[in-house]
Image: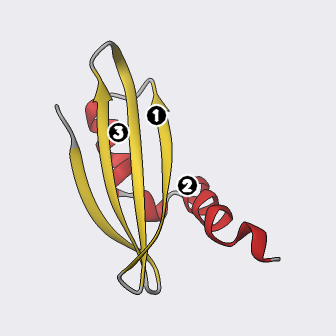
Amino acid sequence: MDGFNYITQLEGDLKACITLCSHEKNAGYWNMRVQLFYENQPAGVASFNLHGYSQEEAESVAKNFNTNAYLMREIDEYLWGDSD
């Protein structure tokens, strides 16, 4: 698998283009790149490493990104963490 791309609505006008790539040398190691868009304008890029996931599990994390409380909290912190 070279890569998996998925676009999802996160919250309100916030969307994510998620790219999931495997590392050939390390089975079960995935990099998930999340390019964020707010009101269709680039808002930043976050990256997550997934260790010990099968292809199906990693794809499920990417497809269900917006329902994962940990990942959504990380995105909130990335975008709004310094605004307090």
In the image, 62 versus 16, the foreground residue is 16
Q: Quadrant of residue 64?
A: bottom left
Secondary structure of the residue carrying tag 1 is strand
At a point 48% along the width and 35% down the height, the residue shown is 49
The numbered mark at residue 58 is 3
Q: Which numbered dot is residue 71? A: 2
Vertical arrangement, residue 52 with respect to residue 40, above or below:
above
Secondary structure of residue under mark 3: helix
Query: For the residues marked 1 and 2, what is the alpha-carbon distance in whole angstroms?
Result: 12 Å
- Amino acid type at mark 2: Leu
Residue assigned mark 1: 50
Q: Is residue 76 left or right of residue 52?
A: right
Mark closer to the chain start, 1 or 3? 1
Q: Which labelled disc corresponds to residue 5?
A: none
Q: Position of residue 2 (x, y in %)?
A: 17, 34
Structure colour scheme: secondary structure
Disc 1/disc 3 C-alpha distance (Å): 7 Å
Lateral position of residue 79 relative to residue 43, left or right: right
